């Protein structure tokens, strides 16, 4: 059974802190990615494709927790920019899969390096062990979805 820690924090105060932290990191990431004209949803898609050879649009939607039409809009833009390509799925001529192009793979590598560089500056006042603890907690909470 969960016992609330005695840190003088009410649940609504914790919720407000969490909401502000989410907005802060979201705004930071949007600004950092904006330098490469990449949105947060596009970055998530590119990252998933970097980690997987190919994914169906429905698999991307499931991984992102959104409906397939939302992913379709993002994919159209990424296809226009030649960062991803849609091909026929092996064994199912009716289905398509999405893959990173060489340009997309290169863009992910470039953006990843720059975002980490930006993050080092953004998080300079927070100790590395605190950042790791935060990420650990986020992973545990994400597993509850």
Image (cartoon, rainbow, N blue to C red):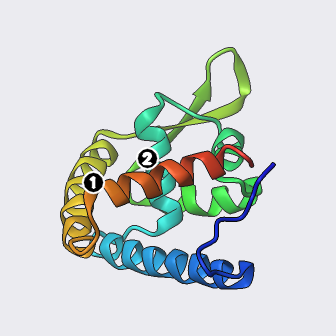
Count of marks, rendered view: 2
Q: Is residue 79 visible?
A: no
- Callout 1: 10 Å neighbours few (<14), some, many (20+)? some
Q: Relative to 16, is 33 on the left or the right?
A: left
Residue at mark 1: 112
Give the residue displayed 45% in from the left and 69% down from the top: 39
* Residue 116 % position (x, y): 24, 59
Residue 15 screen position, x and y as percent:
67, 78
Upstream in the sequence, badge 2 or badge 1?
A: 2
- Front position in the image: 55 or 119: 119
Examine the rendered structure and indicate whether residue 2 appears above or below residue 10. above
Q: Where, by quadrant of the figure, is residue 8 drawn?
A: bottom right
Alpha carbons under labels 2 and 1: distance apart? 9 Å
Q: Is residue 144 left or right of residue 83?
A: right
Q: Secondary structure at mark 2?
A: helix
Q: Residue furthest top?
A: 91
Left or right: 61, with 85 as reference point: right
Q: Is 3 or 13 nearer to us in this picture?
A: 3
Q: Residue at x 55, y 47 (%)?
A: 139
- Closest to the observer: 90 or 48? 48
Q: Which element type, helix, strand or loop, lies under badge 1?
A: helix
Q: Can you see residue 114? A: yes
Judge by depth and name the residue closer to the eye, 61 or 131.
Answer: 131
* Vertical side of 99 occupied by 35: above or below: below
Q: Residue at x 71, y 24 (%)?
A: 93
Q: Quadrant of residue 3?
A: bottom right
Q: Residues within 10 Å of mark 2 (few under 14, many from 20)?
A: some
Q: Position of residue 58 (x, y in %)?
A: 72, 42
User: In the rendering, at what x and y percent does residue 68 appear?
Assistant: 74, 53
Residue that carries the numbered disc 2 in the rendered image? 47
């Amino acid at each position: 059974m969960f016992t609330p820690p005695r840190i003088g924090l009410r649940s609504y105060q914790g919720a407000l802190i969490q909401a502000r932290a989410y907005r802060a990191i979201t705004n930071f990431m949007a600004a950092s990615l904006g330098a490469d004209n990449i949105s947060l949803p596009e970055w998530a898609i590119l990252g998933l494709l970097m980690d997987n050879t190919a994914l169906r649009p429905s698999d991307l939607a499931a991984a992102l927790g959104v409906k397939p039409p939302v992913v379709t809009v993002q994919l159209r833009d990424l296809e226009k920019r030649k960062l991803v390509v849609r091909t026929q799925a092996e064994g199912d001529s009716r289905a398509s899969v999405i893959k990173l192009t060489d340009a997309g793979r290169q863009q992910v590598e470039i953006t990843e390096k720059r975002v980490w560089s930006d993050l080092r500056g953004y998080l300079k006042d927070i100790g590395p062990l605190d950042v790791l603890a935060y990420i650990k907690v986020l992973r545990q909470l994400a597993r509850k979805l």
